[in-house]
Amino acid sequence: MINKNPLKGQMNFFQPILKEQLNPRHELYLLSDTIDWSSLESDLSQYYINFGRPAKPIRLMVSLLILKQLYNLSDESVVARWTENPYFQYFSGFEHFQWEFPCNPSDLVHFRNRIGKEGIERIFRMSVELQGKDGKQDKLCIDTTVQEKNITYPTDTKLQVRIIDKCRKLANVYHLKLRQSYTRTVKSCLLLQRFRNHPRNRKKAMAAARKIKTIAWRLVRELERLLPAGIVQDQLALFKQVLSQKKKDKNKIYSLHEPEVSCIAKGKEHKPYEFGSKVSFGITRTTNVIVSVATFKGNPYDGDTLEETLQVHKRITGIQAKEASVDRGYRGRKEIEGVQIITPKPLPAGATDYQKRKMRMRFRRRAAIEPIFGHTKKDYRMERNYLKGFVGDIKNALLAAMAFNIRRWIRKILLLCLQTIEWIIFEIKNTENRKTSFSFQYYKF
């Protein structure tokens, strides 16, 4: 159930109003007055019912999501800083300074689950609409990157030890007595894994790894015998799949709590393999606004991601793209749904200097998407995704792109304000100079 608007109460004459105390040129002050909150609230109100306990205001929850991504904070940190920062509170729609937490940090989790992928996409579309004409272009630059998941670097031994620990916990939950817990045995085997690549330790380490795998199989089979049919069968099947997979198998499982994670190699020397999901970004060619975000399971060929990326761009902006500049990883795609796909290629022998210069500039312009990937990862929480499941991958990528677009708008507005102030100062100085020269000429004669 949607809560009543807290702004429609009686005025408090004993507490100062935030709007009169804050700097009107602050970035959050300007952003708060620019966003169309009424449209956003009406679109997201469909995810609420008309009975039950009143929920937190939609504007409050959306503003907390925006602040969390914009300033690279966790759910707990953004709620804590909200009570200290008056600009955060004004951005959330409050007129007076508050001393208590706006909500429990777990409410942000429930709100993300409530609005789902469609609601997060609506917030992302708001960030694109904020750009005005800069976000309405039919020529794009498209590329893919990897959004890594919050998992440890996977090895077979790590996964097998994790399975042993989970089997012990399941036995405790269902009050089952195992024949042996293997606690001390597993610990001694793990000690032998240190320096396993040294020639003297290699043989002992491999034997210890085989023993850990054997113990994991024993515990899984023992739980199958002791547990009634139909209980935790999915979890036991996952354990079996992990223990059965080989080195060169496809669709391997790299994490027990995130089984949808994929191993993706992007040719990086410092990081040969990344574990997460592939994300495709589409940006406008001349203004660098992110207008399309698509997340994919597994490790699809880059050319196969183009169709969905272009569909997202059309759904967000309502504009049909005409050209899309890509790198050589998209070779084999020339045209998709009427969109011309431009890939770097050797220049024709008969091309004029103007044509050669134009093609080179177009391909160099496509490289502007690479630093955008870096900013979304380092500054806006896409370097390591903490949201659960593949749906969490989709939401986190959309929120990171939303934060990048909002930061771009803030920088543009602040630069415009600075230029306006400089122009005013310049005009004042010119006016004073004109008055001085006139008075000098008057007294001279």
Image (spheres, rainbow, N blue to C red):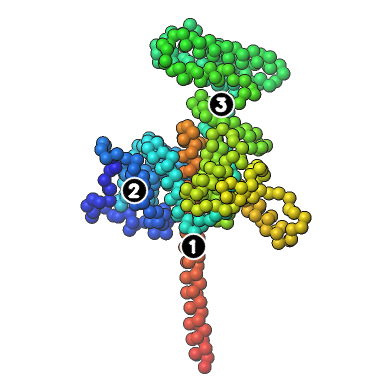
Amino acid type at circle 3 is: Tyr
User: Which residue is identified by label 2?
Assistant: 42
Q: Residue at x 47, y 36 (%)?
A: 392
Amino acid type at circle 2 is: Ser
Q: Is residue 310 above or below residue 236?
A: below
Q: Residue at x 47, y 49 (%)?
A: 316
Task: Answer whether labels 1 and 2 touch (C-beta < 8 Å).
Answer: no
User: Which residue is identified by label 3?
Assistant: 254
Q: Which label belongs to residue 416?
A: 1
In the rendered image, the quadrant that contains the N terminus is top left
Q: Residue furthest left?
A: 10
Disc nearest the viewer among 3 and 2: 2
Q: Residue furthest top?
A: 179
Question: Between marks 1 and 2, how big is the CA–CA gap?
Answer: 31 Å
Secondary structure under the numbered disc 3 in the rendered image: loop
Please report whichever mark, 3 or 1, sits nearer to the chain's N-terminal start: 3
Q: Is residue 184 above or below residue 108?
A: above
Secondary structure under the numbered disc 2 in the rendered image: helix
Please report whichever mark, 1 or 2, sits nearer to the chain's N-terminal start: 2
Horizontal relation, residue 5 to residue 80: left or right: left
Q: Can residue 294 be seen in this snapshot?
A: yes
